[in-house]
Image (cartoon, grey):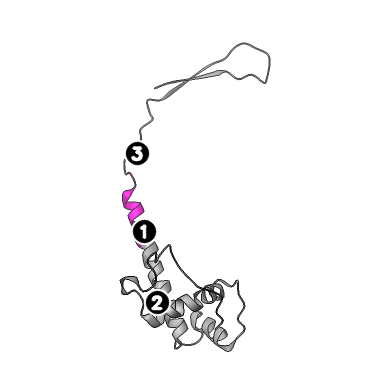
Amino acid sequence: MRNMGVFLDELHFPAGFNANNSFSSEETTMLESYGLTMRQLQEGSLLPLTAAEYYFLAELDGEVPITSHFSRCWRKYNSKITRFDDNSTRRAKSKRATTARDDSDLTVNIEEENNDDDDEYGNLEFDL
């Protein structure tokens, strides 16, 4: 597997991958070293070059059972960020206001002037 640079997910893991014992030290090292490659392979923005990368994609696609450390680590990472995203969606939904505004008393009065010009509009007045 290629190393494309250091992978950090500050959105889901602002304190790092090993904070809160989310990942083991081996998994943290693997994510930081190969996470960019794994993400780009999964998204399809990077084509596999090595046998390990082809096998990684085959494992993710369910063509072969997951046996490599790369796939296990990436599945664990994906399950954790999906759980984080689901929890934030639930929190956002629970914070939304449930009461609706009633605008049935809102009336609109249109006063038109008797001009023959098509480019002039009447004045709008709102009575609240």
Between the C-alphas of marks 1 and 2, the distance is 19 Å
Quarter where residue 67 is shown? bottom left
Q: In this rendering, which labeled residue sits more in front, label 2 or label 3? A: 2
Residue 115: x, y in percent?
65, 12
Name the residue rendered at 60%, 20% in the picture: 121
Looking at the picture, which amino acid does disc 3 mark? Answer: Ala
Q: Which image quarter holds the C terminus? A: top left
List the residue tagged with mark 1.
Answer: 88
Between the C-alphas of marks 1 and 3, the distance is 23 Å
List the residue tagged with mark 2.
Answer: 76
Q: Which image quarter holds the N terminus? A: bottom right
Looking at the picture, which amino acid does disc 1 mark? Answer: Ser
Q: What range of the chain is rendered magenta?
A: 87-97
In the image, taking residue 14 as reference, residue 114 lies left or right, namely right
The first of marks 1 and 3 along the sequence is: 1
Could you say whether the residue bearing mark 2 is in a helix, strand or loop? helix
